[in-house]
Image: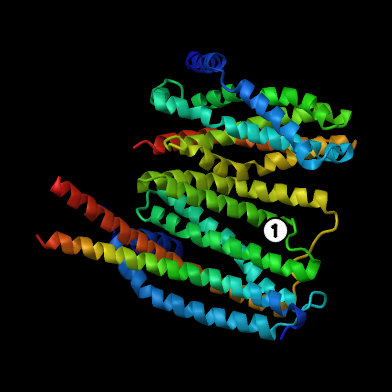
Amino acid sequence: MIAALRAVLSRELTLASRIGAGVELGIVFFLILISVTPFALGPDQKLLSRLAPALLWLSALLATLLGLDRLLQADEEDGVIDELMMSEAPLELVLAVKALAHWLVTGLPLAVLAPLLGLMLAISPEAMLPLCLSLAIGTPALTFIGLVGAALTVTLRRGGLLLSILVLPLTVPTLIFGIAVVREASVGQPIATPLTLLSAITLIILVLSPFAAAAALRMTRS
Amino acid sequence: MNDFAPPPVQDAKASFWASLWALANPGRFMSFSARLLPWLWGATLITMAYGLYKGLFVAPADYQQGDSMRIMYIHVPAAWMGMFVYATMTASALGTLVWRHPLADVSQKAAAPIGACFTVICLVTGSFWGKPTWGTWWEWDARMTSVLVLLLIYLGIIALWRAIDEPLRAARAVAIMTLVGAVNLPIIKFSVDWWNTMHQPASVFRKGGPTIHPAMLEPLLVMAVAFSLLFAAIHMVRMQAEIIDRRAERLAMRAAAGEG
Amino acid sequence: MFGHHTPYILASYGVAATVLVLLIVASYRARAAARRRLADLERMGNEP
């Protein structure tokens, strides 16, 4: 079973590196969003600095959302989902591995890059590592919630927008606590509470979402 | 074929479940609901009239907010209904996925728009309450924000219903989404409360004071009952419509197959 | 009647009433349309 899972993981990563999974696209989108917001807000450093945690997190959220229909859609069209359902590994684990692979190429780069983009928004230096940390812990939650939405909308032709509509309200807790970590760090306050809550939410989502997604895939096959 | 004869009545709980299964037959549900509906509407009208009368004319005006707090008699029960209808949808979702009750998916589908309407009413009345009281049309306080997120979840569920053609597959997908939402809603409520206290150290009371005067409590509860009865009535009508629609759909498919 | 709060109270109760009435009407119309559709199909089934 471990071999089967490892095969899934390596397949995902290979595909991602060959087809150009949108790693670069996600990063570029992230960069563009951050670049464009000062046009909307004005170049006032103090304002940007205060809004930086929110702007970075919102941009990461949107960038993750955009990459989500790549999670299952292509495989569904190629009939790979049916194969995966017959794999010796339980579908829940297979999906978890797929989501993990997806996060490695979309969410993780955002978390790593965010402090650099934060410089453009005059983020305070104490907030940079917490920013990285909060995104590293929070973006898996976004991806795994997206996994459930993707599973529910996989058979739909234009499921992308509906996917976002379903996923966004569920990301509110992650958003709230993720931004709180960065903001508390910006003003020198301790980040233990929001960080713990953020991690707890991510853990709950990581555990429950493969079951919901697997159920969705199974029950919506005709 | 299922045997719909209810088991011998042992206690109230057993007979409740028995009656749910007794109604699993669409035909039985239709005749039962047809008989029940007039009574439901009657009870709704009476409780609604009583609650409105008490709330608008009899209950005292608030010491600080004046008469605008009468809006609470719509706003708070509407919020409760938004959550109660979602609880009904959750139970129906379990009925669809776990217990395979034949009418569970019909119940789910019928309930969603009603819940969405109640949340909209809650948000709009909350806005009208906030303007004379706090001067703004919208306050990001914990309740309004939670109800807003609840509305977004309702809208997503309604969109999901409309996106999938085949009724049973749609029902299962929506059931999973409903359950996912149900698990998330307490987390969302908690995080919104936390977020609110982070940003607004001064707590905002929206109930007309930290303790509710008993004279204000009565219309509130009566309106809650009235709204619940109203939900039951509308829910039943929508379920009937859905059942009839499915019957028509089956006939249409059979006719098409016969001609083919 | 309620002083300067009257328009807000009227608007609130009015919006609530409007939404609920629209919902009730829409539900009954959906049921009537379904009944009509079923009746038409049953009639067509009996004719030939």
Left or right of B44 on screen, residue A203:
right
Q: Residue at x 79, y 70 (%)?
A: B133
Left or right of B37 on screen, residue A59:
right
Name the foreground residue: C28 vs A51.
A51
Q: Residue at x 49, y 57 (%)?
A: B112
What colour scheme has been applied to the protein in the rendered image?
rainbow
Say above or below: B201 vs A13: below
* Residue named by callout 1: B143
Q: How many marks?
A: 1
| Image x and y of residue B149, in percent | 63, 51
For the C terminus of chain A, give its image quadrant.
top left
| Image x and y of residue B157, in percent | 50, 49
Say above or below: B83 vs A126: below
| Image x and y of residue B232, in percent | 47, 68
Q: Residue at x 76, y 41 (%)?
A: A40
Q: Chain of mark 1?
A: B
| Image x and y of residue A199, in percent | 71, 34
Q: Quadrant of residue B22?
A: bottom left
Q: Secondary structure at mark 1?
A: helix
Say above or below: A141 vs B196: above
Q: Quadrant of residue B241?
A: bottom left
Query: Callout 1: few (<14), some (14-19), or many (20+) C-alpha neighbours within 10 Å?
Result: many
Give the amino acid type for the residue marked by disc 1 in the picture.
Arg
Q: Please say whether residue A104 is visible from this viewpoint.
A: no
Q: Please say whether residue A167 is visible from this viewpoint.
A: yes
